[in-house]
Image (cartoon, grey):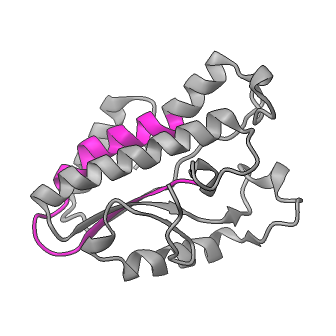
Amino acid sequence: LPSDLLREDSIAAAVEAVAARGEVRLAIDATGFLHDARFSPEKSLRELQADHLAQAFAVNAIGPALLMKHLLPRLPREGKSVFATLSARVGSIGDNRLGGWHAYRASKAALNQLVRTAAIELARRAPQAVCVALHPGTVDTALSAPFAKRGLDVHAPREAALHLLRVVDALDASDTGGFFDWRGQPVPW
């Protein structure tokens, strides 16, 4: 269903429409913002811009947080259900060795914290539910296209989706609140 990640009423309506169709056992948020015609990833602090930071946080953290607000209460109280959102390894504070990309890194780190916090609350209501952040690797999309030339292992979208579905399938309640890569390996916070 079409929805606008920047409008809570749109998110709420989309969740309502999905929930009206039946039980929600799997939801994957595959949203993200790294660059567009106006903004490019910053190479240094000198390049920080408030409007770039605001856009990155709106799409990468606030929108997914509002989606969790409306969707997680709709997950069944019993049995396995999964909410996964696409994060990025560059959102790992512990794995940051290069710097740069300030808005994207910070907004994905914020997303990771929101996932971790939401998972704690979700576990109280639905103990078998899983709420996680996933790093899909570098996927051949418009988001990564300008940066995929740097010798990275790039996955076709279909291949990346299959990797993530395998990871999701292997998750259980003990994994809730975690951050995992496309191979199912934990990513440092």
- Say which residue appears at 37% left-offset and 44% top-offset: 114
Q: Residue furthest top?
A: 50
Q: Which quarter of the figure has residue 26?
A: bottom left
- Say which residue appears at 43% left-offset and 37% top-offset: 63
Q: Is residue 42 above or below residue 51?
A: below
Give the magenta part as a residue range: 59-88
Q: Which quarter of the figure has residue 84?
A: bottom left
Q: For the image shown, how many numbered marks are present on the structure?
A: 0
Q: Is residue 133 left or right of residue 158?
A: left
Q: Is residue 51 above or below residue 187?
A: above
Q: Is residue 13 left or right of residue 63?
A: left
- Say which residue appears at 19% left-offset and 60% top-offset: 75
State yes or no: residue 68 in magenta: yes
Q: Position of residue 183 (x, y in %)?
A: 56, 78
State yes or no: residue 84 in magenta: yes
Q: Is residue 111 above or below residue 134?
A: above
Front in this rendered view, residue 144 or 114: 114
Q: Position of residue 102 (x, y in %)?
A: 67, 34
Q: Position of residue 171 (x, y in %)?
A: 36, 77
- Say which residue appears at 34% left-offset and 43% top-offset: 67
- Residue 15 can be seen, yes or no: no
Q: Position of residue 36 (x, y in %)?
A: 73, 34
- Residue 101 can be seen, yes or no: yes
Front in this rendered view, residue 182 or 159: 182
